[in-house]
Amino acid sequence: MKINWGTGIVIAFIGFISFILFFVVRMSMDNKANHDLVIENYYGAELGYQNEIDAENNSRTKEVDLTLETSDQGLKLVFPTNLNADNIKGKVSLYRPSNKHLDFDLPISLSQDYLLIPDNRLLDGRWDIKVFWEYNGEVYLFKKKITYHQSK
């Protein structure tokens, strides 16, 4: 059977459309291509963003910025030594961009001037750390993106 050029064009269109539909269906069913929103309640979080900006500006202007240190036990979040550790309250949020199931929060309860995040809670790789803390009625925010490697 001989195929003329009109039939060839129709076959080419059908083949191309089938090829595209195959990949659309495959990507929508594949768990590896799961693209969730970064935050579950995105619009609600957006409304509180100005509070974060104000808290971050407080940290810079009052020079009470935190420092991160890596130790054998884990990640050490060091608060300024001129502050009374008993009056510091807040929350540490660790966000893993590659897997939302690894995200976790820690309450800030200090007996010394640092908070230790244990090594067994952190996997190697990229982490976004957000420390939202309060001292004597003032609210502060510390944010940092790190690449963590466990010390062996």
Image: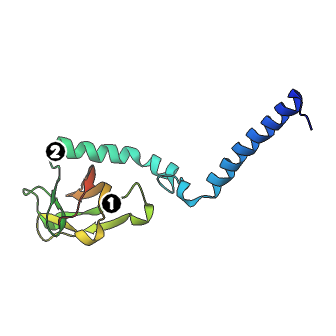
Q: 18 above or below 102? A: above
Q: 30 above or below 51? A: below
Left or right for 28, reference 133: right
Pointer 2 residue: 62
**Residue pushed farthest top?**
5
**Residue pushed farthest front?**
1
Residue visible at 20% across and 58% down?
Answer: 135
Q: Image quadrant for the C terminus? A: bottom left
Residue visible at 65% across and 54% down?
Answer: 26
- Distance between mark 2 and mark 1 Cα atoms: 24 Å
Q: Secondary structure at mark 2?
A: loop
**Nearest to viewer (mark 2 / mark 1):** 1
**Residue pushed farthest left?**
82
The three-letter amino acid code for the residue at tag 1 is Leu
Name the spot of residue 17 as percent of width and height, x first.
75, 41
In front here: 133 or 7? Answer: 7
Q: Image quadrant for the N terminus? A: top right
Name the spot of residue 45 as percent of width and height, x first.
46, 51
Mark 2 closeness class: few <14, some 14–19, many ≥20 residues within 10 Å: few
The number of numbered badges drawn on the structure is 2
Pointer 1 residue: 94
Mark 1 closeness class: few <14, some 14–19, many ≥20 residues within 10 Å: many
Left or right for 63, reference 132: left
